[in-house]
């Protein structure tokens, strides 16, 4: 096994993701979010949305993350999370928001699958329901012992915000976006290296053979095995590549895509975990409280999709 080759390949793929996916999305989203923040619009929206989202354990800022994930891509909510972290959101709030994001579907997989027969409206509604369920169960259950106190962070005063020009906002948000995007590269390299080692060692092929009898026992098609393993180990983009190929060849049907969307289309995969946890050290510490809630949210989505399709 060529370990060095695997690491080099993982490094190249991780840098490509950071340069051509994370940085462009993060730059645009952070500039928009920063502009809204400086003009005071963000604070007004947060105050408006907090009473609505409070029963689910998330603040008004969480609505931005929810919209960005479902309508843009898995990387878009990083901007909202970065602002929450900078503003000193409590551990309990961050855990609930992360659980919500890990449990929901992602726009960069939803939209490309619509031409192949994905029922986007139902998928979106179920995605939001699963995300809010995950945040609520984390807030009231798994993360109830976490501190709900907001951390004290330095904020610029009103005069500073009012005097901030558009160029300064673009430059400041752009540099933050690049820093945050590149900060996710180490964990992404590690996760993709693990995937490469598993593939080269034949572990994935062995796992596929071991899982097949279990799938047959529950009367499930083994066509789901390859997309599921690809999703868990390589992320949503790789999942779409595999599924679109299966659909083109007529091996997989649109009904099967819809029935499995709740389980397959979410951000709780190795690359997604690496990118989100690479944003701040606090997220790594909170992940053990986030994971059970996210899994329950995904389970709810899987049941709803399976029952509907």
Image (tube, helix red, strand yellow):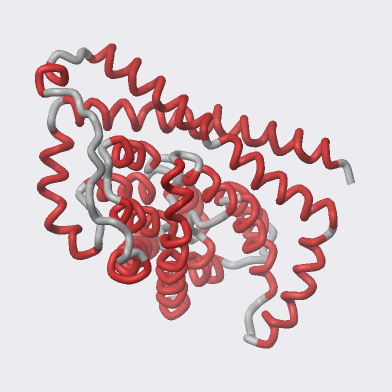
Q: Where 185 falls versus 295 (above or below)?
A: above
Q: Residue furthest right?
A: 1
Q: Where 304 falls versus 249 (above or below)?
A: below
Nearer to me, 74 or 98 = 98
Q: How many marks are shown on the rendered structure?
A: 0
**Position of residue 19 in the picture relative to residue 86 (left or right):** right
Q: Whole-percent x and y of residue 53?
A: 19, 58
- Asked if residue 60 shows in the view, the reply is yes
Nearer to me, 294 or 220 = 294
Q: Where 95 falls versus 307 (above or below)?
A: above
- Asked if residue 121 shows in the view, the reply is no
Q: Whole-percent x and y of residue 24?
A: 45, 28
Q: Residue at x 31, y 35 (%)?
A: 86
**Position of residue 222 in the picture relative to residue 148 (left or right):** right
Q: Whole-percent x and y of residue 201?
A: 85, 55
Q: Residue at x 14, y 42 (%)?
A: 45
**Residue 162 location, quadrant:** top left
**Position of residue 190 in the picture relative to residue 9 (left or right):** left
Q: Whole-percent x and y of residue 163?
A: 14, 13
Q: Residue at x 14, y 38 (%)?
A: 43
Nearer to me, 140 or 43 = 140
């Amino acid at each position: 096994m060529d370990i060095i080759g695997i690491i080099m390949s993982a490094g190249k793929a991780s840098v490509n993701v950071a340069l051509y996916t994370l940085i462009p999305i993060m730059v645009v989203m952070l500039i928009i979010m920063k502009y809204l923040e400086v003009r005071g619009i963000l604070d007004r929206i947060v105050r408006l949305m907090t009473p609505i989202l409070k029963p689910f354990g998330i603040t008004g800022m969480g609505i931005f993350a929810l919209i960005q994930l479902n309508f843009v891509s898995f990387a878009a909510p990083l901007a909202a999370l970065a602002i929450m972290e900078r503003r000193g959101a409590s551990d309990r709030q961050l855990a609930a928001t992360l659980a919500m994001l890990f449990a929901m579907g992602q726009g960069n997989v939803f939209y490309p699958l619509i031409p192949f027969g994905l029922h986007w409206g139902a998928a979106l509604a179920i995605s939001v329901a699963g995300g809010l369920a995950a945040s609520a169960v984390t807030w009231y259950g798994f993360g109830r012992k976490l501190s709900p106190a907001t951390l004290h962070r330095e904020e610029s005063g009103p005069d500073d915000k009012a005097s901030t020009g558009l160029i300064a906002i673009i430059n400041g948000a752009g540099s933050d976006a690049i820093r945050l995007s590149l900060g996710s590269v180490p964990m992404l390299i590690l996760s993709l290296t693990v995937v490469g080692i598993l593939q080269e060692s034949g572990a994935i092929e062995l796992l596929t053979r071991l899982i097949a009898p279990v799938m047959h026992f529950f009367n499930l098609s083994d066509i789901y095995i390859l997309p599921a393993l690809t999703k868990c180990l390589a992320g949503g983009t790789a999942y779409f590549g595999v599924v679109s190929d299966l659909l083109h060849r007529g091996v997989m049907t649109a009904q099967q895509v819809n029935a499995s969307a709740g389980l397959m289309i979410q951000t709780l995969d190795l690359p997604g975990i690496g990118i989100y946890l690479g944003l701040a050290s606090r997220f790594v510490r909170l992940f053990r409280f986030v994971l059970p809630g996210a899994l329950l949210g995904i389970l709810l989505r899987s049941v709803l999709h399976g029952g509907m399709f």
